[in-house]
């Protein structure tokens, strides 16, 4: 799989994971009885870890752009 194809998958999964993590946390905060705590405790932390891994992959795949934009010659 080339870098661009991998980046498309990582970005899509990162967006989905972010939405699931955020919506689960917000739902649990504002509607505590909507999601049983045992279910929340199982999925929310794991989704958060997956999100951090995907963010790391996103930064790694875009590091060339980051390096040239922020650390390039002036």
Image: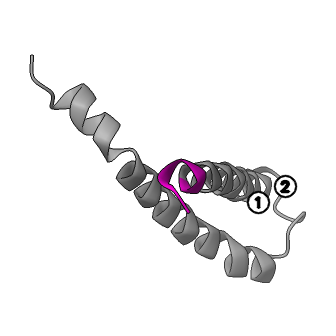
The residue shown at (33%, 35%) is 65
Q: Residue furthest left?
A: 74
> Which residue in the rendered view is the most extreme toward the top?
74
Task: Specify whether residue 54 is painted magenta.
Answer: no
Residue 48 lies in quadrant: bottom right
Is 41 left, or right, of 2 in this rendering? Answer: right
SS at badge 1: helix
**Position in image of residue 33 (x %, y %):** 88, 65
Asked which secondary structure carries label 2, the reply is: loop
Q: Is residue 50 above or below residue 31?
A: below
Percent coordinates x, y for residue 18 in the rendering: 64, 52
- Disc on res. 31: 2
Residue picked out by circle 1? 28
* Cβ–Cβ under 8 Å for marks 1 and 2: yes
Residue 5 spot, x, y in % from top left: 59, 52
Q: What is the chief secondary structure element of the magenta stretch?
A: helix
User: Image check: 62 left or right of 21?
Assistant: left
Quarter of the image with the C terminus is: top left
Q: Residue at x 78, y 50 (%)?
A: 30
Q: Is residue 57 above or below residue 62?
A: below
Task: Give the residue at x 23% y 37%.
Answer: 67
**Residue at point 79%, 79% (across, down):** 39
Closer to us: 67 or 37: 67
Real-space Cα separation, disc 1 to disc 2, in angstroms: 5 Å
Q: Which region of the structure is painted magenta?
A: 1-6
Which sits in the foreground, 73 or 24?
73
Give the left or right position of residue 42, taking residue 33 as reference. left
The picture places residue 12, in percent across and down from the top left corner, at 68, 50
Check the picture and name the quadrant holding the N terminus: bottom right
Asked which quadrant contains residue 10, the reply is bottom right
Q: Residues within 10 Å of mark 1 (few under 14, many from 20)?
A: some
């Amino acid at each position: 799989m080339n870098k661009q194809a991998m980046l498309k998958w990582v970005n899509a999964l990162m967006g989905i994971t972010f939405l699931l993590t955020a919506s689960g946390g917000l739902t649990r905060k504002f509607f505590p009885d909507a999601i049983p705590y045992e279910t929340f405790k199982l999925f929310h932390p794991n989704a958060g870890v997956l999100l951090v891994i995907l963010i790391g992959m996103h930064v790694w795949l875009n590091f060339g752009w980051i390096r040239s934009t922020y650390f390039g010659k002036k």
